[in-house]
Amino acid sequence: MWVGGVLVSGGLGLIVLGGCFLIGAWIMIGAHALGEPDSEGWSLDSRFLLVVLYILAFSCVVGAAILITCGVRSLLGLLKA
């Protein structure tokens, strides 16, 4: 029983962490959109950081889906027993 609860809690924590990465990407995009019209655009470092933030957010959501699925299966297995 504890295992299922821990897996679901971990999955919810990963969703929060993925949201933090998406907020970071959102702040970067918002800061660029509000920048000066004379700006040259995105530097290579900024593009790389934005891609890394999106990859980390996607990985957290996928990991959360896996953890929540395993945790719910474990808890449903207890109900059947």
Image (cartoon, helix red, strand yellow):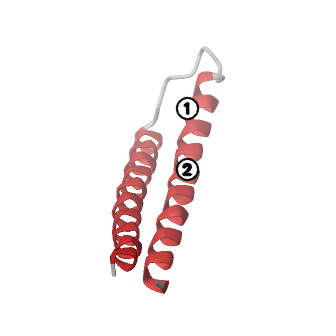
What residue is at 58 percent from the left and 28 percent from the top? 32
Task: Please give the label number shown on residue 19.
Answer: 2
Q: Amino acid at mark 2?
A: Gly
In the drawing, does residue 31 fall left or right of residue 44?
right
What residue is at 47 percent from the left and 41 percent from the top? 46
In the drawing, does residue 29 fall left or right of residue 58?
right
Q: Quick one: 16 or 45, which is closer to the camera? A: 16
Task: Please give the label number shown on residue 12.
Answer: none
Q: Quadrant of the C terminus?
A: bottom left
Which residue in the protein does label 1 denote?
Answer: 29
Q: Amino acid at mark 1?
A: Ile
Looking at the picture, how far across and down is residue 70, in whole percent? 34, 70
Q: Quick one: 18 or 24, which is closer to the camera? A: 18
Element class at badge 1? helix
Looking at the picture, how far across and down is residue 23, in whole percent? 59, 44
Quick check: 61 above or below 3? above
Q: Are there few (<14), some (14-19), or many (20+) residues within 10 Å of tag 1?
A: some
